Amino acid sequence: MDGFYGGANVGYSWGGSVTTTNVVSITTLYSEGLWQHGWEASVEGGYCWQQNPTTYFVACFEVRYDFPPERGTTNVFSVSGTTVTTSDRIDPFLIGPHLGFTTNANRTFWYAAGGLAIGQVGGISIGTGAAGTSVAIPPSGWATGWFIGAGVEQMLNNNWGVKVEYDYIRLDTGGVTAPYVGSNVILNYPGFPAIATIGTQPFDNVVTVGINYHFQ
């Protein structure tokens, strides 16, 4: 399994984050977990090193991008005829080693994965009611974190391999923040706009099935 490789995956992911709305005019902080799940795809590429075919230890370094971005929606609160609904967007890259060993005459690769997660966090929060509509749209922000996982790849011939992998992803961020703008008097009391914070401490679970081509 020595050399460069590239591939593609399909998978299913599920995870969450926390969204808050600080209603300054009534000194109340509303907080709610926001859950997202759905099907996705990914592309990956990397390099594997194996000293020789009789050495079962294999070390790979891989970069993977999952798309489309994870999205979820929740109602943060309802008060005085106003309902606030928030949607988030999480978009990670995974960068790190895959370390393991081969069995079955070097045709099956069992590995643990882990390393750096880098992603964009964003979203939108909308408050509507009889008093009007206000919107908070924080600018997307980059966040770093980590991931850990495990998988197995089965070589079909000298170049093609199929794989299954599970990863847990965590981004260490306090989220992105913006004030509400609009006509809703609850969220835009003169001089005291409410503040939305979206995507705090997002995490994800991802199971992928894919195929790689090894240039060897």
Image (cartoon, grey):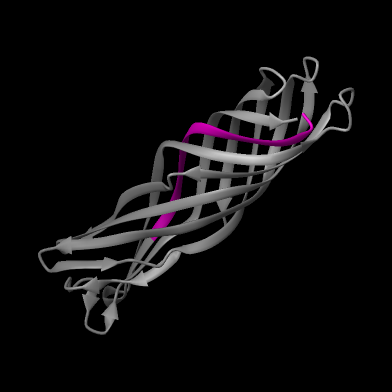
Left or right for 130, reference 192:
left
Type of secondary structure dominating the magenta stretch: strand
**Of the pair 147 and 30, the residue shown nearer to us:** 147
**Residue ID at (60%, 31%):** 165
Span shown in magenta: 1-19
**Residue ID at (61%, 26%):** 163
Where in the figure is residue 31, as x and y percent of width and height? 37, 59
**Residue ID at (48%, 51%):** 91
Where in the figure is residue 139, as x and y percent of width and height? 40, 67
- Relative to residue 211, is residue 84 depicted above or below? below
**Of the pair 27 and 95, the residue shown nearer to us:** 95
Where in the figure is residue 52, as x and y percent of width and height? 89, 28
Q: Quadrant of residue 149?
A: top right
- Residue situated furthest front in the rendering: 215
Left or right for 37, reference 82:
right
- Residue situated furthest top in the rendering: 104
Residue 174 visible? The answer is no
- Relative to residue 105, is residue 176 depicted above or below? below
